Image (cartoon, grey):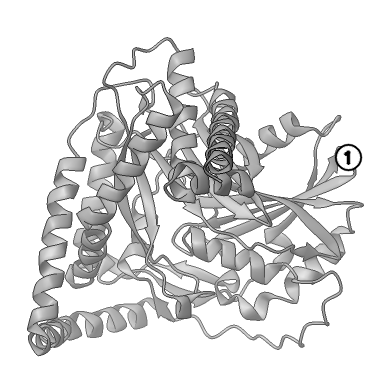
Amino acid sequence: MERMSPLDATFLYVEDGVTHMHIASCAVFEGPAPDYEQVVATIAGKLAKIPRYRQVVRFVPLQLGRPVWVDDPHFRLEYHVRHTALPPPGGDAELRALMGRVMSQPLDRHRPLWETWMIEGMENRRWGLITKIHHCMADGVAGTDLLSVVLDQEPDPPPPEKDVWRPAPQPSDLQLVADAVVGLAMSPYEQVRALRSLTRAPRRSLTQLREMAAGLRSYADSLLPTRTSSLVGAIGPHRRWTWVSVDLDDAKLVRHTLGGTVNDVIVTAVTSGLRQLLLARGEPLDDLVVRSLIPVSIRADDARNTYDNRVSAMFADLPVAIADPLERLTAVREQMEMLKNSHQADAGVGLTALSQFAPSAAIALAERSVMQVMRRAPQHSINTVATNVPGPQHPLYLAGRKMLEYLPFVPIAHGVRVGIAIVSYNGRLAFGITGDFDTAPDIDVVAHGIEDAIAELVGLADQGRSSRSRRQARSA
């Protein structure tokens, strides 16, 4: 039995019939497709490295403590590994429709919180694998690590070790309550221990407190309502999804020639895609900014392949009103630099740490109440979400077939109608765009806008590089 962290539990508490809190990806492989039984056997050989895949969530009676993970005595792998096929012609449109339908359904909380769908019938002798896991199990970085464990690092890996797993006995409700009561009794001790650790290093602690206070002030400013747009409003339970992929080297060229970081280039491309969407909808852009929640990983290197959430957040005002692409990149670069200095991520870490000491029932009630209010009166503080996760820069394989593309999915919540996830894999950048089915039927405009923005920035980088070469030649 293992208790969830407050952040992991949050993703359970805020979920309802409209907000589905699962993250996902669609991996596309070269063909021919293996047998379904071969895919099941391959995943079965990796289960010993992924305990969460055979565990279920148990809630503590009266919410005296946070939910816990326990072994599932009824685990059946074939329930989680599913088999489907696209209708002819098996192209991108059919794949987008399937992904949207799968993402519109919540995961069954009575079973381990994940599904994998093997997809046949794809054009060009390809096949796919949709992997869907609840956010309480992993964040984006952990989800990418998880895929790297399920897949192979080489086409012909050694056979897995024999799996001798036996589920541990399920705890009774009385045991859950007793464990939670012990945890509550320990809370004052933990608070005293934390206070002692602060007094041992007062100068460092004072610096951390100042940084957290600065971050909280920045948080407060960032949560002021923005000017309304069609990106914000009520959503339903159904989803649309599309994607676009570009060369990672193109983003690196722009960074090297025009300045900033690869992440600045990515955020600029996202800004450009949302700008094109708003223009296509005929909305005025004068002085409009689109506020994006940007998750920030706080996962240490020694916590890789640990499946939980270790993430904070920043809030960026995307300058969609700026028409010039170079000025837009400069504005994004300045915005991201300002956010790094604002200590917003530090404030998020501090708030998460403080939630360790709050009663679980109070947190659950507060978060559900907030979601009910947002469902009735959508918020205008956060307009979208953009999450960027670095993936493996080498090929991965399943059943001897090379993964060609790794396409991400990000969930959206009340008031947010469009979200974007970005993942890099083997020299490519994939932008997965999630939209509410009823209010965002045109998310393909975002995809085209992102692709056009990268091409435009690459063109400007080429011009800058040519001008630099000519100046160097003249000076020589």
* Frontmost residue, 422 versus 272: 272
Q: Position of residue 396 (x, y in %)?
A: 74, 64
Q: Position of residue 271 (x, y in %)?
A: 43, 32
Judged from the image, the secondary structure of the residue bearing numbered disc 1 is loop
Q: Position of residue 366 (x, y in %)?
A: 21, 52
Answer with the quarter of the image where residue 53 lies: bottom right
Residue 328 falls left or right of residue 255: left
Q: Is residue 56 above or below residue 215?
A: below
Q: Is residue 122 above or below residue 349?
A: above
Residue at 58% over, 27% down: 452
Name the amino acid type tagged 1: Asn
* Frontmost residue, 276 versus 106: 276
Q: Is residue 417 visible?
A: no
Q: Position of residue 435 (x, y in %)?
A: 51, 32
Residue 461 falls left or right of residue 88: left
Residue 290 falls left or right of residue 355: right
Residue at 15% over, 63% down: 211
Residue at 33% over, 17% down: 285
Which residue is the extreme one toward the top? 282
Answer with the quarter of the image where residue 214 lies: bottom left
Q: Which residue is mark 1?
A: 124
